[in-house]
């Protein structure tokens, strides 16, 4: 089982994996088996890996300075007549103050959780069931939004792994993967502030990232 404290992000920009990807499109990628401790060696130096509370908090600090006063914005709850207006004002004010900041242009990489779903003989890979990861931080709960992410994600394992994984999936066994999403914030809608639907008064922050690349890492 992967956890945010041990999962790292893969971004390959050189060699065979990076070549010929335009024909396959974003969302079809090799299923990598690189050990997490080795991933830093192949990452581009300007990538910002937002994979744990600390790294995410540093990113939010660079963008917006300090967390909002969630208690003030929430007021008397969702039924407070001024609740929506305060939330709208918060988003507009933060958008304006964020404009022009360098962090808006940073290449970022974050994680969603995934599971191999069905083997596709034509591609030699597996379709993927996926979902966002919700990360508690001192800012609130952070949940990255992936803009223009394909609904047809395919992870292609190497020959040494393919038959084993196929047998596991066909036997109904759960095969988890880490979905690595790489991109940049959308300038005109870089971040959305809201409230959690699961816990009253808990702030929810949603950075909105336009997807440029997707990579997959097999959970070990």
Image (cartoon, grey):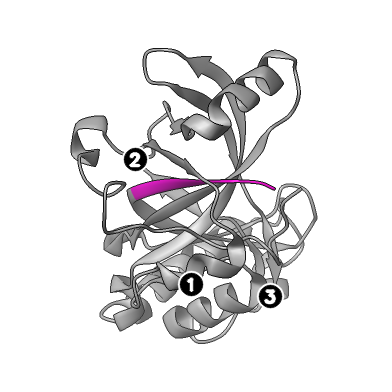
Q: Which residue is mark 2?
A: 148
Instruction: Give whichever of 149, 5 is nearer the camera.
Output: 5
**Mark 1: secondary structure:** helix
Report the residue at 57% width, 56% height from top: 84
Could you say whether the residue bearing mark 2 is in a helix, strand or loop? loop
The question of residue 83 being in magenta is answered with: no
Q: Which circle's residue, 1 or 2, is located before the other in the chain?
A: 1
Instruction: Answer few, some or many: residues within 10 Å of disc 1's Cα (few below 14, many 20 plus, some between 14 and 19).
Output: few
Left or right placement of residue 203 versus residue 40 in this view: right
**Residue 56 lies in what quarter of the image?**
bottom right
Residue 153 image position (x, y, % from top left): 44, 31
Q: Which residue is mark 3?
A: 72
Magenta part mainly helix, strand or loop?
A: strand
Residue 47 visible in the shown view: yes
Residue linked to disc 1: 40
Left or right position of 50 against 109: right
Residue range in magenta is 213-220
- Upstream in sequence: badge 3 or badge 1: 1
Using residue 39 as the reference point, say whether residue 17 is left or right of it.
Answer: left
Closer to the camera: disc 3 or disc 1? 1
**For residue 217, which numbered disc appears in the image?**
none
- Nearest-to-viewer mark from 1 and 2: 1
Asked where in the image residue 218 lies, by quadrant, the reply is top right
Q: Nearer the viewer, mark 2 or mark 3?
A: 2
The one nearer the camera, 193 or 18, is 18
Q: Is there any visible trace of residue 82 in the rendered image?
A: no
Q: Position of residue 151 (x, y in %)?
A: 43, 28
The residue drawn where x is 31% and y is 59% is 186
Tell me the distance, in whole angstroms, between the alpha carbons under discs 2 and 3: 34 Å
């Amino acid at each position: 089982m992967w956890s945010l404290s041990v999962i790292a992000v893969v971004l390959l920009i050189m060699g065979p994996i990076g070549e010929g990807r335009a024909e396959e499109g974003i969302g079809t990628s090799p299923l990598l088996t690189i050990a997490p401790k080795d991933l830093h060696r192949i990452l581009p130096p300007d990538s910002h890996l937002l994979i744990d509370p600390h790294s995410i908090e540093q990113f939010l600090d660079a963008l917006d300075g300090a967390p909002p006063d969630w208690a003030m914005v929430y007021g008397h709850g969702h039924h407070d007549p001024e609740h929506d207006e305060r939330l709208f004002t918060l988003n507009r004010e933060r958008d304006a103050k964020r404009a022009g900041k360098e962090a808006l242009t940073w290449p970022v990489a974050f994680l969603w959780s995934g599971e191999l779903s069905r083997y596709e003989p034509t591609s030699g890979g597996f379709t993927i069931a996926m979902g966002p990861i919700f990360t508690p931080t001192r800012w609130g709960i952070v949940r990255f939004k992936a803009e223009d992410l394909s609904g047809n994600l395919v992870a292609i394992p190497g020959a040494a792994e393919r038959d084993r994984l196929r047998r596991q999936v066909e036997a109904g066994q759960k095969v988890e993967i880490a979905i690595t999403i790489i991109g940049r914030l959308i300038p005109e809608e870089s971040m959305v502030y809201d409230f959690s639907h699961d816990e009253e008064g808990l702030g929810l922050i949603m950075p909105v990232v336009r997807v440029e690349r997707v990579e997959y890492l097999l959970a070990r």
